Image (cartoon, rainbow, N blue to C red):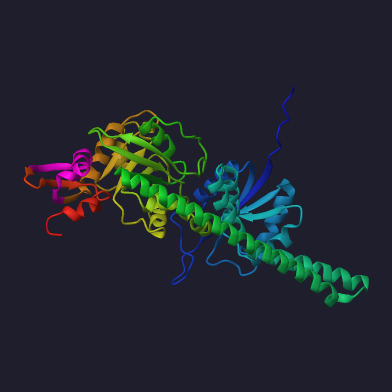
Amino acid sequence: MKEIETVRETAFLVGVEWKPRPGGRYEPAAWPVEESLAELARLADTAGLTVIGQERQTLDRPHPATFIGRGKAETIAATVRALGADVVIFDDELSPRHQRELEAIFGDEVKVIDRTTLILDIFAQHAHTKEGALQVALAQYEYRLPRLTQAWTRRALTRQAGGRAGGATGGVGLRGPGETRLEMDRRLIRRRIAQLKRELEEVRAHRARHRRQRRRQGLPTVALVGYTNAGKSTLLNALSGAEVYIADQLFATLDPTTRRVELPGGTIILVTDTVGFIQKLPTQLIAAFRATLEEVTEADLLLHVIDAGHPQAEAQALTVFETLEEIGAGGLPMITVLNKVDRFPRPDLARVALPVGQRSVAISALTGYGLDDLKAAIEAALEEAMVPLSVHLPYARGDLVSLFHERGLIDEERHEADGTFIRGRLPSVLAPRFFPYAEGR
């Protein structure tokens, strides 16, 4: 039987380059507009759209009504109609007013969306678990609520005009039902948002319980962070032998995956792959994915995975740092992992190409190059984060003596009349268990 080919919708992209203005809110971006539009094209492709054209505008501030100015919007609308594009995608977030005015210019045949809407759509396509679906649904509802208001206002006004033209009950009589429907929809969406938040709080509590259980096991936790498509899932597979889904596209995986990894010295750690970051990441997603992102904030160590060969690697790294600060993980210990060095003539050139800190490792998660060095760096970083302790453990607490041997580094051990004295270092996650028996406490 012959397969039916899916016809992809076509998209036209619009980007803005911001001119510097003293004291202005809109500053020149770390990304050149052409690079940002190239990434937007990749996002569109990930969402199942075919890009057939693009346009850019230079501004010092957004136009209050149409974002890019009415004249420019009308010019682009004519081009879009000539090309037959189905969707126009703006690379910056549009306000509800911008959305309304642009929809009026482009007409009903063309959908007008922004980068945020596109990312939310991709997340909705890629959310395969209940948790992911809940998080995306919450972000979508919160983003659409004010835009729903504007859409209903426009439809209500259209009905008013029709009523006056027909000489029926007049504008006032038709305004009421429109506003009633609008308020009803707003109440329904607010109710749904409240329900989603309750369900996500349950998810958050469930994750917190799992993290407490992992901490009771005394296993250090390492979180993979980085720009989307930097190779985090490939690295998790390489370190653990797992089979996490990977694809050469943005946001191929959303749901966090945790696997056990053994380090050279025999230490077992838990490594978690988390959702990738991206420039102009919608604030609604950061808020909605709080439960997932707590896997990052609660980690003992971060591995910042960078696509070392990407032309915007520095700008991507800056985006990751800014997002980590935003979620409260900016001060955590970190190793910079320069990935995909198999694309360089010599792997050591990756460090020359990127200004990185002292704690960095060049690897290729695809070929396995540098993975032993990375494991050794992880082991060294976790050892540095250990807490020095001297404890007197009663003989009845042989379990704690065994735990110190398994998870700690012992400098001195003596068997005394009333118990075992141990001086050494322990992972910070385990130290509180020993505090009741510690000297000087």
Where residue 75 sits, quadrant-wise, is bottom right
Please identify the quadrant where the N terminus is shown. top right
Residue 381 on image: x %, y %: 24, 45
Can you see residue 287? yes
Q: Residue 351 at what x, y percent from top left? A: 29, 41
Q: As drawn, which residue projects farthest toward the right? A: 167
Of residues 100 and 206, the one nearer the viewer is 206
Q: Residue at x 90, y 71 (%)?
A: 165
Number of marks present in the image shown: 0
Left or right of residue 129: residue 384 = left
Whether residue 60 sits left or right of residue 395 in the image: it is right
Image coordinates of residue 18 in percent, x first then y, are 51, 61
Identity of the residue drawn at 42% across and 34% down: 234
**Magenta stretch: includes residue 220:** no
Horizontal placement of 373 versus 152: left or right? left
Q: Which residues are magenta?
A: 389-414
In-front residue for pair 126/39: 126
Query: In the figure, residue 379 lies in which quadrant?
Result: top left
Quadrant occupied by the C terminus: bottom left
Is 174 in front, or is 428? 428
Percent across and percent down for residue 321 are 38, 54
Q: Residue at x 16, y 53 (%)?
A: 437
411 in magenta: yes
> Is residue 281 at all visible to an observer of this figure?
no
